[in-house]
Image (tube, helix red, strand yellow):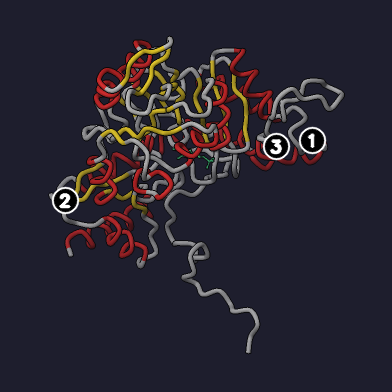
Amino acid sequence: MPIVQAPTPCEPGRAARPRIPLHAPALSGREWAYVKECLDSGWVSSAGPMVGRFEQMVAAWLGRRHAVATSSGTTALHLALLAAGVEPDDEVLVPSLTFVATANAVRYCGAWPVFVDADAATWQMAPQRLSEFVTTRCQVRQGALRNRRSGRRVRAILPVHLLGHPCDMDAIGEIARRHALWVVEDAAQSLGAVCRGRKAGTFGDLACLSFNGNKVITTGGGGMVVTDDLALAERVRYLSTQAKDHPMEYIHASIGYNYRLSSLQAALGCGQLEQLDGHLQRKARMAVRYREAFADRPNVAPMPSASWASPAWWLFTLRLAPGRDAGDLVTRVAARGIEARRLWRPLPRLPMYRAAEQLGGEVADALYAQAFSLPSSPALSSDDQETVIEVVRELLSS
Ligand SMILES: *Cc1c(COP(=O)(O)O)cnc(C)c1O
């Protein structure tokens, strides 16, 4: 009898690579040359010139003064919230519909997420819900905005630009200013998105990026915090490097973290960033083709693209008519070698967030039931895109 059973191909996490993946990295620039530079010079850890070079490139591309590289988008969020002064028992406003990392980062600080429903028109955090919450459910006490029900201090708004589409940052920024709340943007999915002429990641006091393998550009794994405030950038850098107080000695005044990016990862990032404009152009063309290909289908609608937005089109997403199940469609598409993906289960539906306060939630629930993303890799060939279109159109009519 065999002692170790061979993994079956359909075991979760070990699935065979789909013929057309959801979002694969395109590594066709100078990545090899920059990684070789690290190997030849011996600078492979976080020391050496490469991390700083990557930080400067990202800051310049976004037009922000400072950038601090981190080991992931999740650790970027954790440090940005700490730098914004989020403390245990504070509350942070987070969208119901987002990847779990957004809310987890709030909990890492010991603070509590308050979940804000999506806006039906944009699928992004609904400014109307935010506004209702701060005006009707909060009051100013001892100089701080407090949730009347929980008594907790409301510290920050954490908008997430979902799927490459920006949030309405004018409306969110206005609410934040009026109530002296911090804004920390989660731009992990939306490097390159534009809201009324201004890039996502340039609105918040701090903004966070992810360079995970499936994001618009990748370092294999990594993230960044960007800000215009030198003191905030220094705080993030200090916390990311074990709160080191002395260049030569092991002296630390606070509990820091080892959240740094390595030079090898930064080298990939430099190669990737040089290709970002090209990725964005190809993704925009891909979105035009997807929209046109499903325009005659009465039972699906494309993801929104607001008049004031220029999306980065991270994952092109379709929404089925009510009554049809996105999960079922994703399974049937997968059987044809195409990786589609439904959206995130709304976070208040997850066991660890079930008790959290929720502002609405019907829109997020409906999107979870009905929406699914199509392959959107920057290097998706037009032949592959046509195959996706053909298969999905066929399955939609059956
Ligand atoms: C990917 C992602 C993150 C986390 O980034 P990692 O680099 O995977 O840690 C955070 N927020 C959102 C919205 C994301 O999509």
**Residue at the image point whose x is 54% and y is 14% from the top:** 228
Asked whether residue 274 is in view, the answer is no
* Horizontal and vertical percent position of residue 44: 77, 38
State the mark number for residue 262: 3
Amino acid found under the numbered disc labelled 3: Ser
Provide the residue designation for mark 2.
Answer: 322
- Discs 1/3, front: 3
Which SS class for mark 2? loop
Whether disc 2's CB lies below 8 Å from ligand 1 is answered: no
Amino acid found under the numbered disc labelled 2: Pro
* Horizontal and vertical percent position of residue 365: 26, 45
Q: Which quarter of the figure has residue 248?
A: top right
Q: Would you say 93 lies left or right of 304 here?
A: right
**Residue at the image point whose x is 19% and y is 49% from the top:** 300
State which quarter of the image contains the N terminus: bottom right
Q: Which quarter of the figure has residue 337?
A: bottom left
Which SS class for mark 3? loop
Circle nearer the N terminus (1, 3) = 1
Circle nearer the N terminus (2, 3) = 3
Asked whether residue 340 is in view, the answer is yes
Instruction: Give the CA distance from mark 1 to mark 2.
Output: 54 Å
The one nearer the camera, 307 or 328, is: 328
The one nearer the camera, 367 or 313, is: 367
Which SS class for mark 1? loop
The one nearer the camera, 227 or 28, is: 227
**Residue at the image point whose x is 45% and y is 48% from the top:** 23
Judged from this view, the residue extending furthest toward the right is 248
